[in-house]
Image (cartoon, coloured by chain):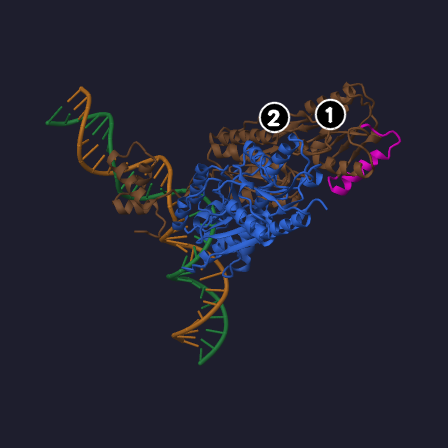
Chain colours: A blue, B brown, C orange, D green
Amino acid sequence: MENNKIPTIKEIAKKLNISPSTVSRALNHHKSIGAVTTMRVHKVAQELGYEVNKSALFFKQQKTHTIGVIIPNLAEPFFSSALTGVEDFADNLNYTVIIGQSLDSLEREKRIIDNMKNHRVDGILVSLTKDTSTYDHFESLKKYKIPIVFFDRVPKRKDIHYVAGNLYSGMLQSVTKLCDLGHRKIGLINGPANLAATLQRLEIYLKCLRIKSLDVDYDSIVSTSLTKEDNKNAMLQLLRLEEKPTAVIVFNDYVLLDCITTIKAENLIVNKDISFISFANLPLWEYMDTMPIASIEQFPYEQASKATEFLFKLIEERNSAKEGNAEYLQCIIDSEMISYTS
Amino acid sequence: MENNKIPTIKEIAKKLNISPSTVSRALNHHKSIGAVTTMRVHKVAQELGYEVNKSALFFKQQKTHTIGVIIPNLAEPFFSSALTGVEDFADNLNYTVIIGQSLDSLEREKRIIDNMKNHRVDGILVSLTKDTSTYDHFESLKKYKIPIVFFDRVPKRKDIHYVAGNLYSGMLQSVTKLCDLGHRKIGLINGPANLAATLQRLEIYLKCLRIKSLDVDYDSIVSTSLTKEDNKNAMLQLLRLEEKPTAVIVFNDYVLLDCITTIKAENLIVNKDISFISFANLPLWEYMDTMPIASIEQFPYEQASKATEFLFKLIEERNSAKEGNAEYLQCIIDSEMISYTS
DNA sequence: TTAGCCTACGCAAACGTTTGTTGTATTTTT
DNA sequence: AAAAATACAACAAACGTTTGCGTAGGCTAA
């Protein structure tokens, strides 16, 4: 009864004394196969517990129905949310998702790309490594016509498909709020220079200050490499200034956690001696005793969803063999300020 | 120059006027191919930018070098840590990981299993859905000789491979600590009955109370379905008791967050009117104003790592065609109490 | 009646790679 | 110098599936 061989189309064919092609067509409900035959095929398939071998299918069709996602770190809520966004979208289209963690190592990023290329995935989503400044390893995907869409951490070039967050909206809301609260000196703890997000934050920060007619003090703009140590130092650097800022925009919630620790160690009171705005909107502030004025939500799930949508659009295009559609899919997702104090 | 065709072994063969088999062997440094030929093949492969088509390889070898991971929810830190554990381990062995989110839906779990089966993954790791009580959908994997290893949320049966957490160690440490602090009435807010983890927590809870010679009050053992609403109700149920417990063991940190909210709404003071121990050790307590006495770390990363190790052992076994090795790989990872208050 | 047309299926090739077998030179051994 | 061993490479089959094409038999229509 329990046949220990994995059933194939050929076996079904043999059992019914018909050809494999007929079985294949019958299973796919091809119109050119008679009702009786189709029924008999399905019956035997059922009995044998036949299930299509996708591995064979992928090979035959030169299409793996699989997309790859490369993110720096699975453990970060931002990226696991993003991954969820991808997974949900892909699942709907019956696509499989394979993951790669670059762990912010360019070396790993390259290796993963190569691997996915060899895997012949139908498309790739990437959020860059902190250190990624070259683009060569992505170029090689062109030859394989594997479309690539970047999200969140995107390269600084125009000829790519991407979805990025727009920090402006959330930042302006935040700066406005700080102004309303009476703050006039607003500092910035920014990220590493090689991240596009860093430049973007700086530009928007300056733009917002200008709009609100606030003076820019370049001494109160510092940066961190995102290590705990560096985060603390950045904070201290601001505290040591002659003219201390009364509010600080912080690169993200993680950096802010370290800043708060630093502040407390200095016997300063958050939201009294100094106020914060940061980015990420981690689901933790509502439970904490000290929190920023607000955190700027960047909607990782939505960003990733949109990026996935783009990717499938590109995959679709490739399938329909439209050549030379030189249009780049690009999208900006507006950020939003989430207030934590009244 | 830029050939837009994807290079294959055949092309290399044609270009050199040798047979594809020779090219294949040359690329794999097979000893039966002369040094000159091997070199020439590699040179041309280099020029053409040849890269093996794994899709074809997987098919040919009837082995996909891919494992599947099914977890309830990517967004939960516990599971994203676990996934990281899997990814790290698999990556080392050059395996690809495909993911499936069951979202705690049995229906999805089944669908994902079917999909991975059709995908012909080499093995599957599963952490069960809240509602999974049947085992049928896993049985079908036997026919395909796809090994399966459960972790964390494992089925209640003995004939499986699994890695589970042992709550006993951490729980005993915790109960001991509570006793040392003077608590004599320790309640339990448990999870849904269909989870093995729930039964396990209950058993161990009772065992620990017995060891410490504490009375068991069955009224102070309640359960929650893990919804926010239900968490609150479970907490209230305990607070309404004639003989309120002075300490409560909580199913996990998430439930505890809701409990704390409930406590505050009742104008009670955590760690004064009532103390908590919970499970998970989320990386958030150190930043919070109210926190449990301790949280019990279950080492998701290590659990997943071990489970992955088991899986590869099974995959290896299958490859070497050892039949009927009826030994079940099972492992218990000891939990550990992480204290937050002195 | 016969040309033409469905219906229902079989045949064979193809996707890219590996691998067992076979074949032919060249070298080594006796 | 003949026999045996070795080195190198070609041939062909195989993995499971799909699909273009061919075709036999039965039907319709003129």
Q: What amino acid is labelled 1 in the image?
A: Ile
* SS for callout 1: helix
Q: Chain of mark 2?
A: B
Please state the horizontal and vertical placement of residue B337, each as a whole percent of the image: 68, 25
Q: Residue B203's image quarter? A: top right
Residue A181 seen in this snapshot: yes
Is residue A304 rendered to the left or right of residue B223?
left
Q: Residue furthest front?
A: A242
> Which residue corresponds to mark 2?
B331
> Which residue corresponds to mark 1?
B204
Q: Residue A280's image quarter? A: top right
Badge 1 crowding class, 10 Å Cα cut-off, few under 14, some 14 to 19, many 20 or more, is some
Q: Is residue B309 magenta?
A: no
In this rendering, the answer to whether A6 lies above or below B177 is: below
Please state the horizontal and vertical placement of residue B277, each as a whole percent of the image: 73, 28
**Quarter containing the C terminus of chain B:** top right
Residue in the image at 68% along x and 32% along y: B285
